[in-house]
Image (tube, rainbow, N blue to C red):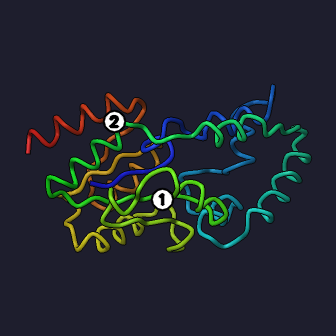
Amino acid sequence: MLFDFHGVLTNASPWDAFAAAGGDADPAVVLELFVGDYGSASDHPWHQLERGEITMADFGMGLVQRAADAGVELDFTALRNYHADMAAHPRMVETIAKLKADGYKTALVTNNIKEAGDDWRALVDLDALFDAVVDSCVVGMRKPDPRIFEHALDQMGGVAPERAVFLDDHPANLEGARRAGLRGILVANVDEALDELDALLAAG
């Protein structure tokens, strides 16, 4: 069983906070400034940041310039509030702990940035929940690249992809997992996604 972090293990996803940073600007334009074409394998600065190739300071300076060029005034209040309010989702934590106790191999597969590592890692006991933690900025690969899922399965002791299920809140990441041979569950609502996982496991 493989799980994303933000928006899956936690109570909120950053996408709304990114869009809100642009105020009245078109949310699609603001998201493009922040993350580019998220589902692509590109050299957009956000993708480089998540692969650990540039620093947060480098990204921030570039973002401010891109926003200025696009005529978008950024307000980071929503992002600061998002990080301040972020917490682990109780049912998700309980489910992962039970899966691990029942003998399932578990892994966290997250697109993240080096400078945020101490904060998000402190939210839950990762060692207690997961057999493997795959952080994009450490391994130099980011979802939805199928290779990051193949790496995670190797870190789990060689789990066969057809026996693995991945939960994520972004459709592109699920498509990458499916290209690696895994089954995927979209997490738009944690309770509904976990009910879907329970039904899948019960079906065998």
The residue sitting at 46% across, 48% down in the picture is: 172
Q: Position of residue 185 (x, y in %)?
A: 32, 41
Q: Position of residue 165 (x, y in %)?
A: 26, 51
For marks 1 and 2, the one nearer the N-term is 2
Q: Amino acid at mark 1?
A: Lys
Residue at far top of view: 24
Residue position marked by numbered label 1 in the rendering: 143
The residue sitting at 87% across, 38% down in the picture is: 72
Q: Is residue 26 left or right of residue 139?
A: right
Q: Label 2: state its secondary structure.
A: helix
Which picture quadrant has residue 9?
Answer: top left
Q: Is residue 194 left or right of residue 111?
A: left
Q: Is residue 158 left or right of residue 102?
A: right
Q: Nearer the viewer, residue 109 or 171?
A: 109
- Where's the N terminus, which quadrant? bottom left
Q: Sort mark 1 into few (<14), some (14-19) or many (20+) by Cα contacts within 10 Å.
A: many
Q: Amino acid at mark 2?
A: Arg
Residue position marked by numbered label 2 in the rendering: 91
The residue sitting at 35% across, 46% down in the picture is: 167
Which picture quadrant has residue 43?
Answer: bottom right
Q: Position of residue 164 (x, y in %)?
A: 23, 56
Q: Position of residue 180 (x, y in %)?
A: 32, 62
Q: Nearer the viewer, residue 106 or 58?
A: 106
Q: Nearer the viewer, residue 113 or 175?
A: 113
Query: Is 125 above or below relative to 168?
Result: below
The numbered disc on residue 87 is none
The residue sitting at 51% across, 46% down in the picture is: 6
